[in-house]
Amino acid sequence: MANSSITPHSASIKKLILALCIVSPLVIFAFAIYLPPASDFIDSFWPAAHHPFDPYSVSKFLNPPWVALLLYPLTFLSERVAQAIIAYLNLSVTLLLIARYGGNRWSFLLTLTSAPFLSLLVNGNMDWLPMAAFLLPTQWGLAVLLSKPQVGLMAGLVWLKQVKRKDLFLIPAVCLLLVSFLVWGNWVVDMFQQVNLLNSRSVVGPWNIAPFPWLIPVGAWLLYQSWKREDVLIAIAATLCLTPYIAFYSLTAFLAVLSARNPRAAVIAWIVLWTFFLAQRWIVLRFYV
């Protein structure tokens, strides 16, 4: 079975993991002191973590319920430390994702100074989870991608084409879904009711940058190209075109892989994304605040 964690850059990844472990206390401490309060973490994930078996009682929680259960151990810490740990995970997994695809120093610089990544740090969302999927064996990566599908779920089709035992490839994801329905019931209905409720209150509106449904034809073409070329980067781009909701910071995974694969194209993306981010902030401040 294909294994996405085995790359020609394994030695450098191991060194990076060691370095991240060594500096983790200092980085987490710095994040706890200097990061501003993270709206997504405080309004959604932190309260949901306190109610892991009824996460949709938190009005802004929109992820699959096992994400809340995964975060439950953080509730034994203070809110500031918990937020700092999530920020550290977002930083670490982003760095490892760049390294996994062979990025150089410019790849790291472009991604870490990009508007999506900095937005991810200060919002405290869980993009480290789906990004971690690209560091794992593919069958486990697919299961992890389900925690936030809009980041790159279509990569699962590329992995499915690459593996020999397609039945075994699907087992972890299928088992996760089956167990989740046993524990939380029909949580899919609850989650979509939550989304519809937020949409009716116009809470999500200005933050949703998804080109859906206008770019569905483009997304379908990209999906075909990703299948044909067995290209994960194109599959991530296809996902972004085909999903109905994307927050700006969820472009971090795409930019990280792009910067590693094609730094010159990433420079253009960096400029475009900063321009878009500043324009979006002006619109929000002008019309929504």
Image (cartoon, rainbow, N blue to C red):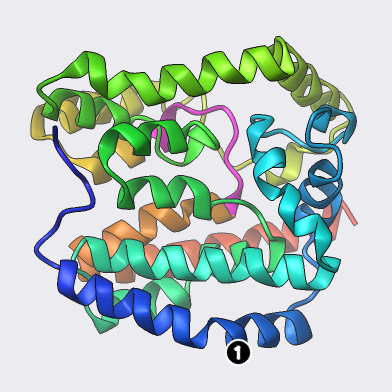
- Residue 29 lies, in percent from the top left, at 69, 85
- Residue 175 lies, in percent from the top left, at 46, 19
Residue at left 81%, top 72%? Answer: 80
Residue 92 in sight from this viewpoint = yes
Q: Quadrant of residue 227?
A: top left
Residue at left 49%, top 31%? Answer: 146
Mark 1 residue element: helix
Tell me the quarter of the image containing the N terminus: top left
Residue topped by disc 1: 26
Looking at the rendered structure, the kind of residue marked 1 is Leu
Q: For this view, does 285 lie left or right of residue 89?
A: right
Residue at left 52%, top 27%? Answer: 212
Highlighted magenta segment, given as a residue range: 238-248
- Residue 216 lies, in percent from the top left, at 40, 22
Q: Quadrant of residue 260?
A: bottom left
- Residue 152 to residue 107: above or below: above
- Residue 87 to residue 125: above or below: below
Residue 265 in sight from this viewpoint = no
Q: For this view, does 173 lie left or right of residue 196?
A: left
What is the tally of numbered marks visible in this picture? 1
- Determine crowd level at label 1: few under 14, some 14-19, many 20+ residues with C-alpha closer than 10 A: few
Q: Quadrant of residue 225?
A: top left
Q: For this view, does 129 lie left or right of residue 77?
A: left
Residue at left 64%, top 33%? Answer: 66
